[in-house]
Structure formats: C-alpha cells, structure tokens
Amino acid sequence: MSTRKGVVRFSISLPPKLVNEFDEAWKSMGYDNRSKAAHDAFRSFISEHKWTREEAEEIVGAIVLVYYLDKPGLLNEIIRLQHEFESVVSSVMHVHLAKDKCLELIAVKGKVGKVRELSQELAAKKGVKQLKFAAIAL
Ligand code: NI
C-alpha cells in the first residue's frame, strides 16, 4: 500500500469474471475510469454498512438474494432462518430464475439490528451468490 497526494494505492484480488462485469457496468454508466467507479462502489458499501449499525431504529425494507438449489440443505436453511426471524419477516416472494438458481425477495419490518442479523446470516450461507438489502427508514 502506498499513499501519495491524498490517495492510497493498493492491490486487491478478484475473480476475472467479476472484474469484467464491474468494468462493463461502470462503462455503461458513463464513468471515465475504474478508480472513480470503485470509489463510488466503496462509498455505497460503507454507507449501507453504517446505516445498518443503528440497531434500535425501526425500518422496513427488502432482502433480495440469489442462490443455488444444488447446495445441499441450503433451501431448508433459508426457510429455517425465515422462521427463526419471523418477528421481522413480513412476506416472501420466490422466483425460479433457472433450473438450479432461485431468487428470494424477503420483505422485512422491524428493528435494524434484527433485520441486519437475518441479512448477514443469509449472506454467509454457502451457495448464496449475492444478497442485497434495500432499507427505508420509517
Ligand atoms: Ni426456485
């Protein structure tokens, strides 16, 4: 890591497919370079994290996750977690994306801390490809 003129340079390791997808995304969004796009992506990542640290606040929102059906026990585990957190789960929509891939949209309402806990436990499951949490403060 090196610091020069108020910027820090460092290297990170990412799968090539992810880099290609990121490059395609920022180019189509009109960014001039990868650094600015990464800056905004980092900023957005941090904002989301900061927001979800206000444990006692009430929120409504949606957890959207994409996962693979062929991971043993994953579907059961996702359902089990929804039952464990039934105090904040309002409703669930399941979308079959492909033979082996599903999307689940979980509408949530309740304390940030509880919603975050559910979200993190889902994200940590092996076979969950991606998870997004969209929160709206009440
Ligand atoms: Ni499905």
Image (cartoon, rainbow, N blue to C red):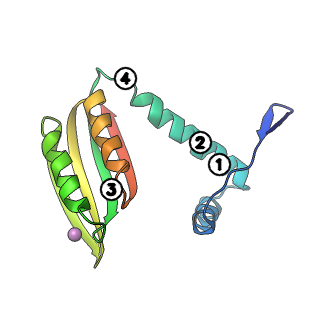
Kind of residue sitting beneath label 1: Ala
Alpha carbon of mark 4 to alpha carbon of mark 1: how far?
Answer: 26 Å
Q: Residue furthest right?
A: 4
Q: Are marks 2 and 1 in contact (CB under 8 Å)?
A: yes
**Helix, strand or loop under label 2:** helix
**Helix, strand or loop under label 4:** loop
- Circle 1 residues within 10 Å: few <14, some 14–19, many ≥20: some
Kind of residue sitting beneath label 3: Leu
**Helix, strand or loop under label 3:** strand
* Residue that label 1 marks: 38
Alpha carbon of mark 4 to alpha carbon of mark 3: how far?
Answer: 22 Å
Q: From the viewer's side, name the closer residue of 32 and 122.
A: 122
- Which quarter is ligand 1 in? bottom left
Q: Position of residue 20 (x, y in %)?
A: 62, 68
Question: Which residue appears at 46% of the width and 29% of the height?
Answer: 50
- Precedes in sequence: disc 4 or disc 1: 1
* Residue that label 3 marks: 65
- Precedes in sequence: disc 3 or disc 2: 2
- Residue 54: which disc? 4
Question: Which residue appears at 26% of the width and 60% of the height?
Answer: 74
